[in-house]
Amino acid sequence: MPITFDLTGKTAVVTGGSRGIGLMAARGLVQAGARVYVVSRVEDACRTAAADLAQIEGSADVIPLAADLATEEGCRKFTDAIAQREESLDILINNAGAAWGAPLEEYPVSGWDKVVDLNLRAPFLLVQALLPLLEAAGDAIDPARVINVGSIDGLRVPGLPTYAYSASKAGVHHLTRVLAVELGPRHVIVNAIAPGPFESRMMAATLESHQERLESTAPLRRIGKPDDIAGTVVFLSSWASSYITGAVIPVDGGINLQAEA
C-alpha cells in the first residue's frame, strides 16, 4: 500500500502554497516524496515556507517561486517560468484564492473582480498554459493531475455575505467537471476538494467568533486538521486515484450536509 501513495519522482506546483490549505497540501506532497514548487505572491513567505518544508526527512527539492496570479500578466510570467525550468509537470494544485465580505448593497465591483479573477480565472489560465507540460507527464495508466481547491461555500449557501467567493468556488467546482471531460482523453485527470473550516489566515476572523459553534454543529464535532488536507491531496495525486476524474470531494467533516446554522 505505501507504494500506491508514493510520489517519488513526481513534480508538483502548489499555488498559494506558503500558508493555510496550500501549505498543508504542499507538506503532504513533500512527505510523499514529490518535488514541489511553493508559489505565493509574497517572495519572503515563499522562501520561509520552502525552507520549512525542506526540513522534512527524505524531502526532495522544494522550490520557492513568487508570482502574482491575480492578473493575466502575472499568470503568464509564472507559467513561462515553470516552462523554462520543467519539461513536464505531474501535479498542479490550484489553491491561491481570496475572499471579500460586504453587505449586498455595499459590495464593491473591485472586490468582486479581485476574488473572481484569482479564484476562478487564474486556475483556468494556469491549466491552459501548463497543459503541454501536464500532457508530457501523463499517460493512460498514470495520468497527470490537476487538483482545484473549491469550498463548501460553493456547495451550499453560506451564512456570510461573501457573494463573489461562494460564486467563484461553485464555478471552480463546475470548471473541474468541464476540464475533466475535456482533458481525460489527453491523460490529465481533474478533481477538486471543497474544504470546510481549517485554521488559516482567511478563516481567522470566522474561527475567532464561531469556532465553538462550528465544532458543536459539525457531524464530526471538530474543524479540519492539516493532515485532513494532506491525506486527501496525496490520494488525489497518487496511483490510488488514477480512475477518478471530475470529482468534488468535501473535506469538511460533513458540515456541507447540514443547513447553515
Image: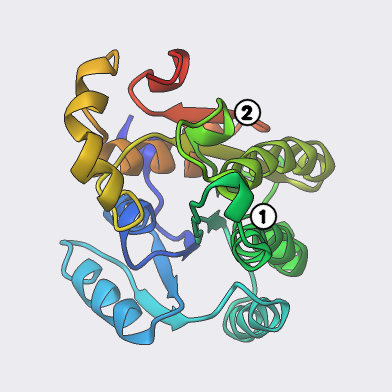
**Residue drawn at x 21%, y 34% as measured from the top left:** 211
Front residue of 8 and 44: 44
Residue 76 percent location from the top left of the image:
70, 80
Of the residues shown, which amino acid type is indicated by label 2?
Tyr
The mark found on residue 243 in the picture is: 2
Of the residues shown, which amino acid type is indicated by label 1?
Leu
Describe residue 210's horizontal placement relative to residue 79 as left or right: left
The mark found on residue 131 in the picture is: none
Describe residue 105's horizontal placement relative to residue 59 as left or right: right
**Residue drawn at x 49%, y 55% as measured from the top left:** 99
- Judging by the rendered image, the residue that carries numbered circle 1 is 120
Compared to residue 85, the image places residue 251 above or below, namely above
Q: Is residue 144 visible?
A: no
Quadrant housing residue 88: bottom right
Q: Residues within 10 Å of mark 1 (few under 14, many from 20)?
A: many
Mark 2 element type: loop
Compared to residue 240, the image places residue 20 above or below, namely below
Q: Residue furthest front?
A: 105
Image colouring: rainbow
Compared to residue 247, the image places residue 94 above or below, namely below
Residue 148 percent location from the top left of the image:
57, 47
**Residue drawn at x 30%, y 58% as measured from the top left:** 201
Q: Residues within 10 Å of mark 2 (few under 14, many from 20)?
A: few
Quadrant housing residue 220: top left
Residue 187 percent location from the top left of the image:
73, 46
Quadrant housing residue 140: top right
